[in-house]
Every structure is written in C-alpha cells, then in structure tokens.
Amino acid sequence: MDLIQSYEEDEAVESSPESSPLRMLKAKSSAPEVDDTALALTVASVNQSNSKPINPTQHVVVTNPTYEQLWAPMFGPAHPYAKDGIAQGMRNHKLGSVEDASIGSFMFDEQHNTFQRHGYAADPSGMNYVGDVEALRKNDGESVYNVRQSEQKRRKIEKNKEERDGEEKKEEIEPEAENPASEAWLTRNRKSPWSRKREVVQGELTEEQKKYAEEHAKKKEDKGQQNEAKGEHYADKSTFHGKEEKDYQGRSWIEAPKDAKANNDHCYIPKRLVHTWSGHTKGVSAIRFFPKHGHLLLSAGMDCKVKIWDVYNSGKCMRTYMGHGKAVRDICFSNDGTKFLTAGYDKNIKYWDTETGQVISTFSTGKIPYVVKLNPDDDKQNILLAGMSDKKIVQWDINTGEITQEYDQHLGAVNTITFVDNNRRFVTSSDDKSLRVWEFGIPVVIKYISEPHMHSMPSISVHPNGNWLAAQSLDNQILIYSTRERFQLNKKKRFAGHIAAGYACQVNFSPDGRFVMSGDGEGKCWFWDWKSCKVFRTLKCHNGVCIGAEWHPLEQSKVATCGWDGLIKYWD
C-alpha cells in the first residue's frame, strides 16, 4: 500500500504546472540487507599480506605468494645476539649469509687474475667491464688466459733480452766476479737445489788425495762385504736332556723302535688331548715329525731354540739346539732324519746333525730365509733350496757350500717351496700373490698363476696321492690346485670356515688323504672331509694362534699342534 500511495503522490506532483524538473527514481532492492564489514576487512588483510615480504622463519604460508614476495630481500626482526641483524639459523658464513653465484670456478679465476694483472675484469652480468678502462682499450679486452701466441713469443723474447742485458751489465760492473772467494762470484754461481749438476772436468789428483781415495774405497768395500756376506754369527751349542745317548746295545737315541709300523690305513679325527710339551719360552713357529716313523718331534721356537721331543716313550725333550741369534722361522728334516735344516731371522741357514747336535755347515746370503727345503730325491739330499726375503730362491750344494742356482722371478718375499711331479718340478708362493712353477735346476718359470682375486698363500701342502696341492689363502679359505701339466684351480673343492687371515697357518693332509687339517688365528684346529669339503670337527687347541698342525705318519688318529702360546699339544 505504501508503494501505491507514494506512486500516486509522485504522479500528482508531475501533473501540476509549477512542478520541478524530472528526477530519477531511487533504486530499490528486494534482497535482504547484508552486513559486509567482515568482507571488507578480509579483502584489506589479503591486500596488505600481498604487499608484505614473507618471513623466512615461518613454516606455513596460508596464501599463494607473488613473485615479488618470493624474491624480496630478507625480512625479519633483528636477532638479539647478531650484530648485523641476521638470525643465526640463516647464516652459512661467519660474516653472514652468502649466496651461491652462478659462475664457474675457471671463469672466476680468469677474471680475478685478469683484474690482478691488468686492472680490469668483466662484470658478472656480462654486459660491462669494471676497473681500468684505459688498460682495457690497450689490451683489447683480453684476459690473462687468452693471450695470442704471437704476443707470448714477443714477451718471451723481451724477457730473455732483458736477462742477457742484465748479465752483461753485471759482468761490466763486477770485474772481481772471477774470484771464487768474492761475494760477487758466489752470487753469480748460486744455483737452485733442483738444477742439474754441472759437469766438472777432473784434474789430476795429488798424492795425498790419491791415498785418501784408496783408503775410502777399501773401507767401503770391506763394509759392503761385511753387510752382504754373512748373517749375524752366534756360537753353536747343543744340550742333551735324555739319560744316555746310546742304549745297552749301542743303538742311538734317534733310532726308531723296531715295532713302529702302521696299524691300518684308515685315519680317524682326534677327540682328546693326550700330552702337552712345554719347553719353549716364546711361541712355537713350526713342528715336524721324524720322517716315516714319527717317534720324535722337532720344533722351532721364537726363543731362538730348536728342540726335539720324544713321542713314543717318555714324552720329554731329548735335545736342544742353540745356534740362532733370532727367532727360528722354518725347519726341515732330511729323508732319513739324521740331519735337519733350520732357517732363522738372523739371516742364517744351519745344517745340523740330529744325533750329536753339531752344526755341519752354515749358509747365508745376507737376507732373511723364510723357507728351507732339501730335494726329496735320495740321490740329491745335498741340494738345499731356500726362499729369501729378497724375492729369490737360492740353491746351494751342501757338500761344497757354493750357490749353484738362483731362481729370481718373484716380486715379493718367497714363502713356500713344494716339490711335485716326482720331484722334477717345484711350486713356490710369494707375497706377490702368485704361484710359480719351476723345473728343478732351470731358473725359468714354466707356469705362472696369478689372478686378481688371489691372495698371498703362506703355506702349501701336497695330497698323499701327489695329484693335488692345498694352499692356505689369506682370504680365510684353502684352495686346491692340480699338480698335473696345467696346474688348474679346482673350483669344486674349497675349504672354508676358519679365520687364518694374517697368519701363516700350516695346512696338512691325513696320511690316507681323507681329511684336510689347518690351524687358525683363534687357536682352533679345523678338520674337513676331502670329498664333501664340509667341516668335520674343530678342536680348541691353543690360546692365541694355532700356527702348525702335523698328522702322525704311522698312528693314524694322532695329531700334533703348536701355537704362539709356546705349547705343543698331542691329540688322539
């Protein structure tokens, strides 16, 4: 009704002659009124936030920032403990925050060196140069790294010319430079320690100088012979510890019992400790049974002594051999057991009489022998082979004491010498991680075995049938090689489980060839089955390293072990 009444009033006013000019009607909305205060505040806050830079310390951004905000300078309140106002968390340098520049190190060095040399450099923007403009024009904008070859030659010629001129001036100014006693001569002839020696023309020597030179040469020669020729010399002694050296029938104490013979051909793994020999004051490095019978056991100790022990009867030490000044490294019996060899770290190899304890002969090259071996042939028992620390295998004739052959191909100290193929050949291993096969008497390698995966092999033993070699590899496994023509690695046979890395633990076979045996670095003795390659048994034998293990040649279930605890143990 109100709308109609207002319409009629407006119409009446328009019809009267004294009415005012036309007016537009007010816009009326039929929608309900809405309070838009909150909306206005929201829009204002968004506009304000778009203009503000982002605080780098906040973890959440509720709006989509613009490009200007993302690339705006760092913003935030001054840090209370930082003088420059940059929060400690934003620092990546002790002087503040340093941004990575998109310029390579070569480019930077080039411009830096150019600026140091010529006084100008390219602006990082690549649009301009900074520094000395005149030098820039003079050098045509060249950097120190792109000088033309012609310019380089010109500079070199100028430099050489300046040097020559300087030397000529010096000669003119310093006439006393010819006098060696003057400072000028010393300055002129001073040479760099890296320059080559100037050849001096030797004049004639005076009588006094000749005499001095002869004496000096003689002294040098004597000293060289002394160092090279012989190892350290020590008095040879031997002590017998038994009751008597001969029995009532006149038989020697080293003679084997008449009833000593193999019971059967089948070997068994030992289970229990039977006897312990303790006489060495330091570790035992090697043990060897008396050949064929095994009634005596020879041991080499790090206390410089070699002892021989009774195995069958009393179980006591029968004789001690003292002749080395340092630890004994290796021992080797002759075929009949009446003599044996010892190699010591005093650089001597000694050939002993087992019964009397006398040293028959001594051999030395001035290097440490790591292994000694007699030729196993009965007619060549006078031939001695020794693997030395200077990479050579030296062959002596014991009768004459002369070196008859040298096998020099290895690249490291020689560790083992093993005869194969009816003693016509021998295999050597070395610290150079290789095996080499030689014809006996011929210093030429006939087979060289070296693979990238191979490790050093400090102990090698031959299978009783003579067809296989067992090599103790320092990567904690025993590898098997054929002794036939090709000396191939048998990949199907590999004995592992023990920890022998770093130790020259001896590997050995049972007399029937059914078992493989080795000591390890933890004092255990391991037994493997030859056919299946599985671990058969382990015995905890020593405190420390079990370095040697020998199977008794006649009593098939008995084994002797030695260790660095100074003990020798006998197992059954």
Image: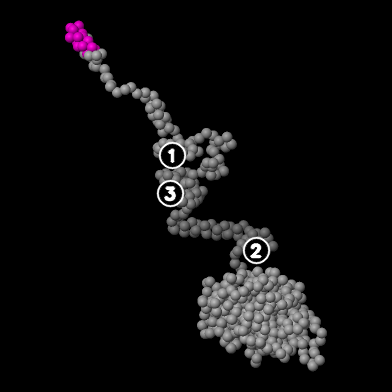
Q: Which mark is on residue 500?
A: none
Residue nearer the viewer, 261 or 420? 261
Name the residue that disc number 1 marks. Answer: 71
Q: Is residue 155 visible?
A: yes
- Residue 426 sits above or below residue 283 on the image: below
Asked whether the beta carbons under mark 3 and mark 1 sit within 8 Å of each other, the answer is: no
Under tag 2, what secondary structure?
helix
Name the residue that disc number 3 marks. Answer: 141
Query: Which residue is at 52% across, 74% downward?
Result: 451
Q: Amino acid at mark 2?
A: Glu
Distance (Cα) linking label 3 and label 1: 34 Å
Q: Amino acid at mark 3?
A: Gly
Instruction: Give the position of the N terminus as an image quadrant.
Output: top left
Asked whether the beta carbons under mark 1 and mark 2 sit within 8 Å of each other, the answer is: no
Name the residue that disc number 2 marks. Answer: 178
Q: Earlier in the sequence, mark 1 or mark 2?
A: 1
* Residue 491, horizontal then vertical, whole percent: 51, 76
Magenta segment main secondary structure: helix
The magenta segment? 5-19
Quarter holding residue 191:
bottom right
- How crowded pointer 3 is (Cα within 10 Å; few <14, some 14-19, many 20+) is rated as some
Q: Earlier in the sequence, mark 3 or mark 1?
A: 1
Quarter holding residue 308:
bottom right
Q: How is the image coloured?
A: one colour
Left/right placement of residue 27 relative to residue 215 reads: left
Residue nearer the viewer, 344 or 423? 423
Under tag 3, what secondary structure?
loop
